[in-house]
Every structure is written in C-alpha cells, then in structure tokens.
Image (tube, grey):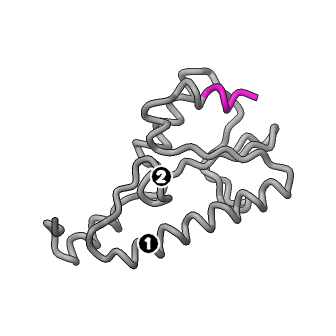
C-alpha cells in the first residue's frame, strides 16, 4: 500500500512528533510515578551522558523511554513502505546510539533501565517493579 500523504506532508507529520513531553511515553510514566508514590526522579538531565528521560540521582538510575517506531521495537515496529532505506538506516543508528549510551552509563556506575512505549501502555505493574530499587 502506498502512502496516502505526499512526501512533504509525511515529512511535516514526522517532524511534528515530539521527543519530550510525549503523552504516550513520558507523561504516562510520570503519571505512573505519582500513582505509585515513586519519588526522587528528575527529567531530562543534560548533565548525564545520553540525556536520559528520567534519572534518580541518589540511586544513580537512568531511565530511557523508547518509542516503538523510532527505536525499532522487535514486537511493534511496522516498517514503512516508502523511503525504506532511509528508515532502516535511521532506526539502526538509533539502536546503535542506545547501545553506546547504555554501555557508557554502566561504565560510569549508573543502572540503566529502558522501557518500550508499549510496555508503559500495557505493563505498568512490571515497570513499577523494575523501578523500585
């Protein structure tokens, strides 16, 4: 099936997807923290390598929330039918960067947790269990 949008419209749509304050990921995780009285977290610490979405500085825990499309979730990713090569390269680069960031943070003594977008939507109890130290 071909894309129903023009290249320009598709480009505008993809560019409009925010990396911060995303309702389906970050804001949902904040709601989960508050509902379970999880305290001590901070958002988007630029001082930490890789800019984790959330950190628990006291416990040196870094949390990343990965969008299923942008980070290539093996369970949810639906490969685009147009501009395939571009998206393969883009998603592979994101995955490579994710591995490098995790490795660096672990070397610096951080515990790194990564959650998929679909986990936040459907497995919130498992997430809480992993976060509580």
Q: Is residue 132 magenta?
A: yes
Q: Which residue is drawn at 27% across and 65% down?
A: 13
Q: In this orientation, which residue lies closer to the viewer: 131 or 2? A: 2
Residue that appears at 31% across and 66% down = 80
Q: In this view, does 33 lie to the left or right of 45?
A: left
Residue ID at (55%, 47%): 65
Q: Position of residue 25 (x, y in %)?
A: 46, 43
Residue 92 in the image, given as x and y percentages of width and height:
52, 69
What's the residue at 48%, 52% (across, down)? 74
Residue assigned mark 2: 74
Q: Which of 76 and 10 is in front in this view?
A: 76
Q: Could you tell me what secondary structure mostly forms the magenta stretch?
A: helix
Residues 69 and 54: in front is 69
Residue at the far top: name it.
Answer: 36
Mark 1 falls on what kind of element?
A: helix
Q: In which quadrant of the rendered view does residue 11 lie?
A: bottom left
Left or right: where 38 falls relative to 116: right
Whether 125 is among the magenta residues is no
Q: Residues within 10 Å of mark 2 (few under 14, many from 20)?
A: few
Give the image location of residue 116, x and y in percent.
51, 45
Q: Mark 1 — residue?
A: 88
Magenta part of the chain? 128-133
Pointer 1 local density, CA inside 10 Å: few below 14, some 14–19, many at least 20: few
Residue 14 vertical position relative to residue 52 in the rendered view, above or below: below
Q: Which of 44 and 60 is in front in this view?
A: 60
Q: Left or right of 124: which side holds 61?
A: right
Q: What element carries label 2?
A: loop
Of the image marks 2 and 1, the number of the one nearer the N terminus = 2
Q: In which quarter of the image is the C terminus?
A: top right
Count of picture labels: 2
């Amino acid at each position: 099936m071909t894309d129903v949008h023009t290249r320009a419209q598709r480009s505008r749509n993809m560019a409009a997807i925010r990396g911060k304050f995303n309702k389906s990921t970050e804001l949902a995780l904040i709601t989960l923290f508050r509902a379970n009285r999880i305290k001590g977290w901070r958002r988007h610490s630029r001082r930490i390598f890789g800019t984790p979405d959330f950190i628990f500085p006291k416990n040196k825990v870094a949390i990343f929330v990965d969008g299923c499309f942008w980070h290539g979730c093996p369970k949810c990713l639906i490969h685009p039918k147009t501009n395939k090569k571009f998206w393969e390269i883009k998603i592979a680069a994101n995955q490579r960067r994710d591995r490098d960031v995790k490795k660096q943070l672990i070397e610096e003594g951080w515990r790194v947790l990564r959650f998929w977008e679909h986990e936040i939507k459907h497995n919130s109890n498992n997430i809480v269990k992993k976060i509580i130290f």
